[in-house]
Amino acid sequence: MKKIVSLCLMVFLCLTWVLVGCSNDEAKQSESATENTPIVTTSEAPTPTPVPTVQNDKWDNLVVTVVDKVLHEANMDTYQLSDFVEFVINVQNDYDKEIRGVEGILTISDMFGKEIMSANLDITEESIPAGGSIQINDKGLDVNQFMDSHAKIRDTPFEDLIFTYEPTHILFTDGTSLE
């Protein structure tokens, strides 16, 4: 039993060392890349502006907006082993028919427009009535503490993040679709 515990501890320490080493290499590369970059400052704080969700004319009648970010911290009492970032999403259907489901890609960027991460986001919780909207509260990110992008999304205030949704497929309840 002691050998198994010792082996597990060694594996954990090795993985931690590798992950921390990778993070340090990324930081060194980032530091060397920014050493020769001029720094420009202004006296005004940037004002976050909404980024259009629509990427193409055929998607004009679908508006997907992330309206809030809620952090649920890890809680061992409820067996939630990691932090969870929940996104509150509004989906507006301006088509003349009901939507059964939407496939697409959610991109999260910092206030300067630099991409932090992208992920597939399918909206299939409930049908979206023609001319109506729904709110989704159960989409989010289980935070991996060893991934810089996850930590940045968790730690950055909502108003300093830019969310862009690019639909790739809409399925209507009548069986027709847009791709």
Image (cartoon, helix red, strand yellow):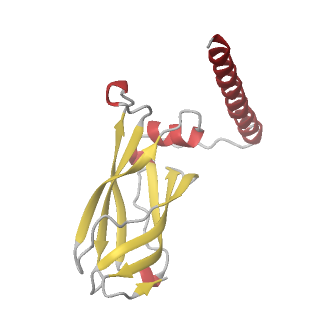
* Residue at x 50%, y 54% (from the top left corner): 108
When the figure is inspected, residue 93 is found, relative to residue 7, above or below; the finding is below
Residue 171 sits in quarter: bottom left
* Residue at x 52%, y 37% (from the top left corner): 151
Picture quarter with the N terminus? top right
Which x, y percent locates residue 96? 27, 87
- On screen, residue 166 versus residue 24, left or right, reads left
Residue 53 sits in quarter: bottom left
> Total marks drawn?
0
- On screen, residue 63 versus residue 145, left or right, reads left
- Please name whichever residue, 67 or 83, is drawn nearer the observer in this view of the structure: 83
- Please name whichever residue, 29 or 6, is drawn nearer the observer in this view of the structure: 6
Q: Please, which residue is most extreme toward the front here? A: 1
Which x, y percent locates residue 167? 46, 72
When the figure is inspected, residue 42 is found, relative to residue 95, above or below; the finding is above
Residue 60 in view:
no
- On screen, residue 121 versus residue 3, left or right, reads left
Which x, y percent locates residue 31? 72, 35
Residue 13 sits in quarter: top right
When the figure is inspected, residue 126 is found, relative to residue 33, above or below; the finding is below
When the figure is inspected, residue 67 is found, relative to residue 42, above or below; the finding is below
Residue 165 in view:
yes
Q: Please, which residue is most extreme toward the top here? A: 2
* Residue at x 45%, y 83% (from the top left corner): 57
Which x, y percent locates residue 161? 45, 49
